[in-house]
Amino acid sequence: MLYHIVTFGCQMNVHESEKIAFILESKGYKLTENREDADVIVFNTCAIREGAEDRMFGNVGALKKLKKQKPNLIIAVCGCATQKYSTGEYIKNKFPFVDIVIGTFNLHKLDDYLDQVKFKKVFDIWQEGEIDEQKSYLRSSGKNAWVNIMYGCNNFCTYCIVPYVRGREKSRKPENILKEVQEIVNSGLYNKITLLGQNVNSYGKDLDINYNFTKLLKDITSINGDFKVGFMTSHPKDITDELIDEIATNDKILKEVHLPAQSGNNRILKLMNRSYTREKYLEIINKIKKLIPNVSLTSDFIVGFPTESEEEFQETLNLVEEIKFNSIFAFIYSPREGTVAAKMDGQIPEEIKRNRVNRLLSLEKKLQKEVNKK
Ligand code: SAH
Ligand code: SF4
Ligand code: F3S
């Protein structure tokens, strides 16, 4: 019995696919790289931009034929896209050959659903759920071990679907994280541990103990062993001097900071509900550069947010020029159903958005050459 997993989206999903693999292997399935050979195919989906959803629809739709040839094939779709009501329903109606549709809060139940599906189709999307500490992972990212430290997001940036499909911020208990890291170190298989969360800087705020992300980093790096720790993503509004100091002085922490700016213009940042200004962002970056001399800085930007003018976009260009990141990700704004920004007047035409992203990317290419040379 063979399984195949198709993963879309961020590292969070990449890591959760390692959980799906664990569940499938514990039921006796073995991995195949070949979709056509599989007895179970799982799509772990993303909803962040329209493109991610479209690719998923294309992939799932293409399996209709295979399912006809192999009626016993089990097709499961899970992850962020199914959690979005309209998409979950769409899959159910448009792709009746899909056997299991589940969301982000009940992934750990895949086990049971695989038993149930022998008798009837499963369509089960929860609106919330507890953190699952029972299931393990089949790690498959080389010498890097992902460790999720928190789920969900409370920030509601006006363009973003994540809070709607991943729910409110929930931090794992420090003892559970430390136990997992200890096991990873004991295995001797990994030399890097990457901590994951939508906003790791606010780790612990929802726990009723006096504990935060810097303390977690201290506790993790005090575990004996030869490993380095990285993390993503940091939100500029929650980054503290204490944290910057810890990165600067702790040998076990990688000197890498991914700090999405999204825009260089204050009016747009405000409309995005990012809770910082261009000046504040620059202040943080300068502090990081000063205290961590060889730091690798990366960022995310969105171009063509509703009402963004040419001049405002140029402020993004000159922010990128000024900071000289090691690399950036530039995204075309994609309206997401149910978010505040999707309903805003002044949506930017597609060709202008494309023109802006191209200009930002060619600036990035030019700057990267200089930075890498250095
Ligand atoms: N939690 C992280 C980001 C998660 S999403 C943070 O706040 O930094 C990863 C990136 O996708 C974001 O940084 C943003 O640049 C981009 N993104 C999110 N929603 C988007 C949308 N509707 N359109 C285009 N890009 C988007
Ligand atoms: Fe989305 Fe903002 Fe949360 Fe990041 S911080 S996941 S961009 S709402
Ligand atoms: Fe990640 Fe996409 Fe979900 S970016 S959190 S997989 S919407």
Image (cartoon, grey):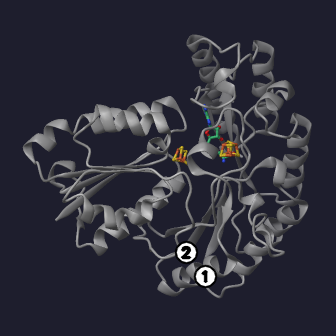
* In this rendering, position of residue 279 left or right of residue 340: right
The mark that comes first in sequence, 2 or 1, is: 2
Q: How far across and down, in percent of the image, does residue 359 sit?
A: 64, 21
Look at the picture and state if 354 lies above or below 26. Answer: above
Q: How far across and down, in percent of the image, does residue 205 sit?
A: 79, 64
* Closest to the observer, 31 or 358: 31
Q: Mark 1, residues whose alpha carbon is within 10 Å: few (<14), some, or many (≥20)?
A: few
The image quadrant where one finds the N terminus is bottom left
Q: Which residue is mark 1?
A: 226
Badge 1 amino acid: Asp
Q: Residue at x 44, y 67 (%)?
A: 142
* In this rendering, position of residue 219 left or right of residue 329: right
Q: Residue at x 8, y 43 (%)?
A: 69
Look at the picture and state if 180 lies above or below 66. Answer: below
Q: Residue furthest left?
A: 69
Q: How far across and down, in percent of the image, does residue 250 sit?
A: 78, 73
Q: How far across and down, in percent of the image, does residue 262 sit?
A: 72, 35
* Closest to the observer, 9 or 227: 9
Q: Mark 2, residues whose alpha carbon is within 10 Å: few (<14), some, or many (≥20)?
A: some
* Closest to the observer, 300 or 253: 300
Q: Which residue is mark 2?
A: 191
**Mark 1 sits near ligand 1, with its Cβ under 8 Å away:** no
Q: Determine contact: label 2, label 1, CB under 8 Å.
A: yes
Q: In this view of the protein, can residue 137 be seen by the observer? A: yes
Q: Residue at x 80, y 19 (%)?
A: 312
Look at the picture and state if 250 lies above or below 69. Answer: below
Q: Residue at x 79, y 39 (%)?
A: 274
Q: In this view of the protein, can residue 363 be seen by the observer? A: no
Badge 2 amino acid: Asn
* Closest to the observer, 162 or 143: 162
Q: Secondary structure at mark 2?
A: loop
